[in-house]
Amino acid sequence: MSGEFESVPDEILIGGCWKRGTGPAGEVIDPGTGAVLQVMTQATADDVDTAVALGAAAVADPAWRDLLPHQRARYLHRIADAIERSAERLALLQSYNTGKTLAETRGLVASAAGTFRYFAAVLETADEDLTTQRGNYLTMSVREPIGVVGAIAPWNSPVASDAQKIAPALAAGNAVVLKPAEWTPLVSLALARIIDEAGLPSGLLSVLPGRGSVVGDAIVNHPGIGKVTFTGGTRTGRMVAHAAAEKLMPVSLELGGKSPTIVLADADVEQAVSGIMYGIFSSTGQSCIAGSRLFVDRRIYGDFLARLVEKTARLRVGPGREPGTQVAPMVHAEHRDSVARYVDLARAEGGRILCGGGIPDDDRLRDGAYYLPTVIDGLTNDSRTCQEEIFGPVLVALPFDGEDDLLAQANDSVFGLAAGIWTADYRRAWRLARRLQAGTVWINTYKQFSISTPFGGVKESGLGVEKGRAGIAAYSRQKSIYLGLDDQPNPWAD
Ligand code: NAP
């Protein structure tokens, strides 16, 4: 195994100052071994107050407020450079704190750097609108920062999800108060140190780890927070939306999913099997877009499932820092136990466990939060197992008969985050893609991400989009300016 754990200082970033949090101490666990990595002091609602006040002052400071887009973009480039210089350290830290494989955390760190670069480029090339002239005046629509943005992130891919919020919010000229998940504060604090050391003006970024019900709630309800960008579960997202409605505050919500992946009878079986396995079992299934409901044409259902189960049973489950591991531990033993309860529920609902369905029988992994990749069938789409987000390495398979049956089942979900289609027939794929209720549809690929392509969910999977050129617009307000061209006084007054 590679790389020793290096602790991060027990300090949080409040409006440009590194201080010990004034909240309770929380243990940060290595889910691969169950060992305590370090104890971190958390933030409080008072820390949120200070961070918001300092953030508001920093946004209003002419040294930041008056920067031209290309000048602001330079900060983002500098941050991207600094992330790349610290890439291996960040990847290792994230692997220790989340259990993920190093291959995955390296990819997430690279994507964080790429996100800062992308939004620097978007910022430098964004045009403002001179709208069509309708009188003796010129009309313009310009974009201005919102002020202080609250960003609340989940534990599943911290460094990448932090960057996805911080980069466009700073690009649009805002300050950011970020709350990482209580289980995974380390990489967000390490990223904050990198951003701070890259020279971002003081006060523009605060990173306040702590419990959602304390620090998250204080951010969402703070009168000085002008927008909240939230990624997490649908239940929490709904609470955030209620609070936002009270304040009449804009909010972006990236929420849960129960995404269907579909195999038509003409699909390339080997390609579909490997894509489906990657879609559900990479990240140990802890991915909002995990393809967790598999629909296979009944004519090939038996053979297809046999091949899928045979390959799934051979996946290498092990520590995230061991070369060759495909399925790493889950983020926390509590979360692993919740996944195990879902598999018990599937059994109670009449599901057949085709592989997995328990913890690995391996002494080496005994103390970690491991769970075997699991394939279940024999359930109907209205079962709780098929309807609720499990957020673990659990795939439930269902046969379908024809397109109407397929679409009725695939769309019968409160969620609408993503979908996958495996087929050789692109006309059919296009037709299905247009009728699936999902924010993203992958055809003959799955779980690929591009920062230049907008991402968001429909139905209970979210509101608004992140990424893409629209990503910056989500962090700004539009203002219209009329520039009068008359030489004479307004005749109305005569
Ligand atoms: P979660 O329990 O909803 O927590 C998300 C964040 O919200 C955490 O930082 C949490 O803090 C905080 N929080 C909890 N209660 C809060 C409150 N009352 N007010 C404000 N903030 C509060 O979700 P999770 O279990 O961390 O993450 C898994 C979920 O995220 C899954 O449903 C997954 O699908 C979703 N997700 C969606 C996307 C997407 O882009 N659509 C991406 C990744 C994950 P604490 O954890 O510290 O309590």
Image: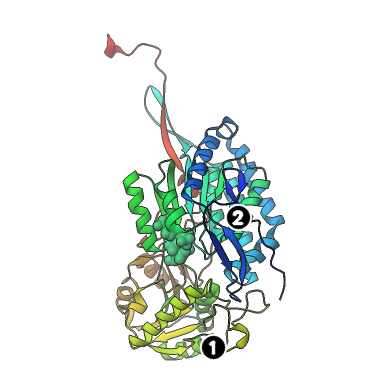
Q: Residue furthest top?
A: 494
Residue at point 33%, 53% (across, down) = 242
Query: In this orientation, which residue lies closer to the viewer: 155 or 218?
Result: 218
Identity of the amino acid at label 1?
A: Ala
Q: Position of residue 132 (x, y in %)?
A: 40, 32
Identity of the amino acid at label 2?
A: Leu
Give the secondary structure at mark 2.
helix
Quarter of the image for residue 406 reads: bottom left
Residue 232 can be seen in this image = no
Foreground disc of the pair 2, 1: 2
Residue at point 62%, 50% (across, down) = 117
Q: Quadrant of the N terminus?
A: bottom right
Q: Is residue 11 left or right of residue 136?
A: right
Give the secondary structure at mark 1.
loop
Q: Position of residue 300 (x, y in %)?
A: 42, 88
Gap between marks 2 and 1 measured at Cα: 37 Å
Q: Is 439 drawn above or below residue 75 in the view shown?
A: below
Instruction: Give the image quadrant in which the ligand numbered 1 is located.
Output: bottom left
Q: Position of residue 463 (x, y in %)?
A: 38, 55
- Looking at the image, tell me whether mark 2 or mark 1 is earlier in sequence order: 2
Q: Residues within 10 Å of mark 2 (few under 14, many from 20)?
A: many
Numbered tag placed on residue 189 in the rendering: 2
Residue 124 can be seen in this image = yes
Query: In this orientation, which residue lies closer to the viewer: 430 or 199?
Result: 199
Residue at point 68%, 77% (across, down) = 323
Q: Is the residue under label 1 in contact with that under label 2 (CB below 8 Å)?
A: no
Q: Residues within 10 Å of mark 1 (few under 14, many from 20)?
A: some
The answer as to whether callout 2 falls within 8 Å of ligand 1 is no
Q: Which residue is mark 1?
A: 313
Q: Is 143 drawn above or below residue 41 in the view shown?
A: above
Q: Is 139 drawn above or below residue 31 in the view shown?
A: above
Q: Position of residue 240 (x, y in %)?
A: 38, 54
